[in-house]
Amino acid sequence: MNTEPGDPVLERVQRVAAQTFMCAPDEIGPATVASDVAGWDSLSYTIFIMNVETEFACELDPLEITNFTCIGDLIVALREKMV
Protein backbone atom coordinates (compact mmCIF):
# COMPACT_ATOMS: atom_id res chain seq x y z
CA MET A 1 0.00 0.00 0.00
CA ASN A 2 1.35 3.42 -0.92
CA THR A 3 0.52 5.54 2.11
CA GLU A 4 2.94 8.20 3.18
CA PRO A 5 2.67 11.21 5.48
CA GLY A 6 0.84 13.90 3.57
CA ASP A 7 -1.32 11.35 1.71
CA PRO A 8 -4.70 13.09 1.27
CA VAL A 9 -6.79 9.92 1.69
CA LEU A 10 -4.97 8.99 4.89
CA GLU A 11 -5.30 12.53 6.23
CA ARG A 12 -9.05 12.58 5.60
CA VAL A 13 -9.48 9.18 7.27
CA GLN A 14 -7.35 10.35 10.20
CA ARG A 15 -9.52 13.46 10.59
CA VAL A 16 -12.75 11.43 10.56
CA ALA A 17 -11.30 8.87 12.98
CA ALA A 18 -10.11 11.61 15.34
CA GLN A 19 -13.58 13.14 15.40
CA THR A 20 -15.31 9.79 15.84
CA PHE A 21 -13.01 8.23 18.42
CA MET A 22 -11.97 11.52 20.08
CA CYS A 23 -8.27 10.89 19.59
CA ALA A 24 -5.40 12.71 17.94
CA PRO A 25 -5.25 12.23 14.16
CA ASP A 26 -1.66 11.00 14.38
CA GLU A 27 -2.85 8.08 16.53
CA ILE A 28 -4.42 6.65 13.38
CA GLY A 29 -2.29 5.09 10.65
CA PRO A 30 -2.56 2.39 8.01
CA ALA A 31 -1.67 -0.37 10.50
CA THR A 32 -4.14 0.82 13.17
CA VAL A 33 -6.58 -1.84 14.41
CA ALA A 34 -9.51 -1.58 16.79
CA SER A 35 -7.51 -2.62 19.84
CA ASP A 36 -5.14 0.33 19.25
CA VAL A 37 -7.88 2.93 19.80
CA ALA A 38 -9.62 3.54 23.13
CA GLY A 39 -13.37 3.61 22.65
CA TRP A 40 -13.39 1.65 19.40
CA ASP A 41 -16.31 -0.75 19.66
CA SER A 42 -18.92 -2.01 17.21
CA LEU A 43 -21.15 1.06 17.57
CA SER A 44 -18.33 3.59 17.22
CA TYR A 45 -16.97 1.62 14.25
CA THR A 46 -20.37 1.81 12.56
CA ILE A 47 -20.48 5.56 13.17
CA PHE A 48 -16.91 5.87 11.87
CA ILE A 49 -17.78 4.04 8.65
CA MET A 50 -20.88 6.20 8.16
CA ASN A 51 -18.76 9.32 8.68
CA VAL A 52 -16.15 8.03 6.21
CA GLU A 53 -18.86 7.37 3.63
CA THR A 54 -20.10 10.92 4.09
CA GLU A 55 -16.59 12.38 3.90
CA PHE A 56 -15.79 10.51 0.69
CA ALA A 57 -19.32 10.64 -0.79
CA CYS A 58 -19.33 6.89 -1.35
CA GLU A 59 -20.97 3.74 -0.08
CA LEU A 60 -18.89 0.85 1.20
CA ASP A 61 -20.16 -2.70 0.81
CA PRO A 62 -21.20 -4.13 4.21
CA LEU A 63 -19.41 -7.43 3.55
CA GLU A 64 -16.27 -5.57 2.57
CA ILE A 65 -16.44 -3.51 5.77
CA THR A 66 -16.59 -6.59 7.98
CA ASN A 67 -13.44 -7.95 6.31
CA PHE A 68 -11.27 -4.88 6.99
CA THR A 69 -8.46 -5.84 9.35
CA CYS A 70 -6.90 -2.39 9.70
CA ILE A 71 -7.27 1.22 8.60
CA GLY A 72 -5.06 0.42 5.61
CA ASP A 73 -7.73 -1.93 4.23
CA LEU A 74 -10.25 0.91 4.44
CA ILE A 75 -7.85 3.24 2.63
CA VAL A 76 -7.38 0.70 -0.18
CA ALA A 77 -11.17 0.36 -0.58
CA LEU A 78 -11.59 4.12 -0.65
CA ARG A 79 -8.92 4.52 -3.30
CA GLU A 80 -10.65 1.89 -5.45
CA LYS A 81 -13.89 3.87 -5.19
CA MET A 82 -12.12 7.09 -6.18
CA VAL A 83 -10.80 5.69 -9.47
Image (cartoon, grey):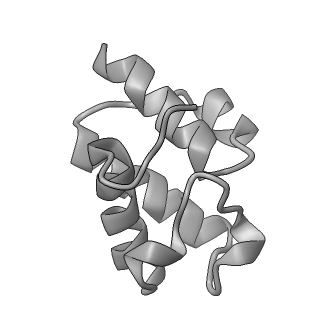
Q: Please tell me which residue lies in front, 14 or 6.
A: 6
Q: Is residue 34 left or right of residue 12?
A: right
Residue 58, position as x, y percentages in the image:
30, 31
On the question of residue 60 being in view, the answer is: no
Residue at (58%, 31%) from the top-left corner? 1
Specify the farthest residue to the top: 83
Residue 20, position as x, y percentages in the image:
41, 74
Q: Is residue 8 above or below residue 45?
A: above
How many tags in the picture? 0
Q: Is residue 7 above or below residue 34?
A: above
Residue 60, position as x, y percentages in the image:
46, 31
Q: Please tell me which residue lies in front, 66 or 36.
A: 36
Q: Please tell me which residue lies in front, 66 or 7.
A: 7
Residue at (74%, 46%) from the top-left corner? 69
Quick one: quadrant of the C terminus? top left
Image-quadrant location for residue 73? top right
Residue at (58%, 52%) from the top-left corner? 30
Q: Is residue 58 above or below residue 34?
A: above
Residue at (36%, 50%) from the top-left corner? 52
Q: Is residue 41 left or right of residue 51?
A: right
Residue 22, position as x, y percentages in the image:
42, 86
Q: Is residue 16 above or below residue 55?
A: below
Q: Is residue 69 left or right of residue 23?
A: right
Q: Is residue 69 left or right of residue 11?
A: right
On the question of residue 38 being in view, the answer is: yes
